[in-house]
Image (cartoon, rainbow, N blue to C red):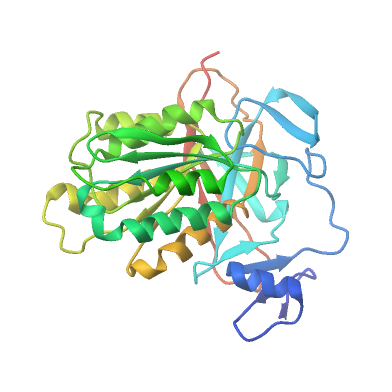
């Protein structure tokens, strides 16, 4: 444990060392925690326990069950993940450690939260013929992902090969999803873009304001009707984070398979999510659990744009970090922008 300049400390937890049960739990999550000063002030602009959705117009922050505080201003809410050089989550940072810019203009942060708010999650599952040898591991990783999620999260599952199909509608039941996954089989080609587009449309029925897609696939698209440009436009217009577990063949025989990793990486990064590459199939469940943990340990930064013009134009967003002294270089993962409302 190292003491930092303003009374903070960083705890890097390693196997075989455990000072307290709480540290043991962090070790399992593979996190780096920055301990805040005693009696930290509540999040500015939001009550204790506030639930902050991702990108939205008029914000509604939950104060207590059955009660909403509605703000009479347009607010943009950006989920942010922070990792260290070893790709471990960094938690415990404070509002003053962050700066946010829209179209290169610094914005005033109006709300800041890091609570584990529930998420609506769509799972996009590749069932093409090339997944046959990976199917059991992939199913197990999806089940592990759901088991380690927030109990209040809701999920739907879309399977795809020649076309996407809804396997399980919105549910919080691990058993229901596990039973449905047991019935699916692999075969045929890969309509990945159609499946992502379908998932984005399905997410419009979500109950929670925080939303994410998890794509589990081993290659590029060779069957979709929607184009890459159409899907990228749909992704930009949504407030959905995209994470991907990629099981790629290093000797992919077709151009579509060779460009698949780049497509998933770019789409995920743009939304503030990430692509996780699988080198060993036995690691898939661990990767799925890591993504689940990441979704439960995000910061949500809210600001009212200085430019409130409702012109429908793309607004570039950049989140910058000025962490306490003594920390290693940190990486910020956040969506790259949003479309302003038209009215």
| Corner quadrant of residue 45 | top right
- Residue at x 50%, y 72% (from the top left corner): 86
**Foreground residue, 46 or 103?**
46
Looking at the image, which is closer to me, 181 or 331?
Answer: 181
Q: From the viewer's perspective, is 259 left or right of 93?
A: left
State the residue at coordinates (51%, 55%): 145
* Relative image position of residue 137 (x, y in whole percent): 37, 61
Q: Check the image and name the residue furthest to the right.
A: 39
Q: How many marks?
A: 0
Name the residue rendered at 60%, 81% in the picture: 14
Image location (x, y in percent) of residue 66: 80, 29
Horizontally, is 273 left or right of 229 in the view? Answer: right
Residue 269, image x, y percentages:
42, 48
Picture layout, residue 180 above or below residue 289:
above
Residue at 67% in and 67% down: 33
Which residue appears farthest toward the top when viewing the image? 343
Asked whether 248 or 153 is in front, the reply is 153
- Is residue 167 at all visible to an observer of this figure? yes
Q: Which x, y percent locates residue 82?
A: 57, 58
Q: Quadrant of the C terminus?
A: top right
Q: Residue 225 falls in which quadrant of the image?
A: top left
Is residue 92 found left or right of 283 in the rendered image? right
Quadrant (top left/top right/bottom left/bottom right) for the N terminus: bottom right
Instruction: Work out whether residue 143 or residue 275 is closer to the camera in this orientation and state it.
Output: 143
Specify whether residue 272 is in view.
Answer: no
Left or right of 245 in this view: 111: right
């Amino acid at each position: 444990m190292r003491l930092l300049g303003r009374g903070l400390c960083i705890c890097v937890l390693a196997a075989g060392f455990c000072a307290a049960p709480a540290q043991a739990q962090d070790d399992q999550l593979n996190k780096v925690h920055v301990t805040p000063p005693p009696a930290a002030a509540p999040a500015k602009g939001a009550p204790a326990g506030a639930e902050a959705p991702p990108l939205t117009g008029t914000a509604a922050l939950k104060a207590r069950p059955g009660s909403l505080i509605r703000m009479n201003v347009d607010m943009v809410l950006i989920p942010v993940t922070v990792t260290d050089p070893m790709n471990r989550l960094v938690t415990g940072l404070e509002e003053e450690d962050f700066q946010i810019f829209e179209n290169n203009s610094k914005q005033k942060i109006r709300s800041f939260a890091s609570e584990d708010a529930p998420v609506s999650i769509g799972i996009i599952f590749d069932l093409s013929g090339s997944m046959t040898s990976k199917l059991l591991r992939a199913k197990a990783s999806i089940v592990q992902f759901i088991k380690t999620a927030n109990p209040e999260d809701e999920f739907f599952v879309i399977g795809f090969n020649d076309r996407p199909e809804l396997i399980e509608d919105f549910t919080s039941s691990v058993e229901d999803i596990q039973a449905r996954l047991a019935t699916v089989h692999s075969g045929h080609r890969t309509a990945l873009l159609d499946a992502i587009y379908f998932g984005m449309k399905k997410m419009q029925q979500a109950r929670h304001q925080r939303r994410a897609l998890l794509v589990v696939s081993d290659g590029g698209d060779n069957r979709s009707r929607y184009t890459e440009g159409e899907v990228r436009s749909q992704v930009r217009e949504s407030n959905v984070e995209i994470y991907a577990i990629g099981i790629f063949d290093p000797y992919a025989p077709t151009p579509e398979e060779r460009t698949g990793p780049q497509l998933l990486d770019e789409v995920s990064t743009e939304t503030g999510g990430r692509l996780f590459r699988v080198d060993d199939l036995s690691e898939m469940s661990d990767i799925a659990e890591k993504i689940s943990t990441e979704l439960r340990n995000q910061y949500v930064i809210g600001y009212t744009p200085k430019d409130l013009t409702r012109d429908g134009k793309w607004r570039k967003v950049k989140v910058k970090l000025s962490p306490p002294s003594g920390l290693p270089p940190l990486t910020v993962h956040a969506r790259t922008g949003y479309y302003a409302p038209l009215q």
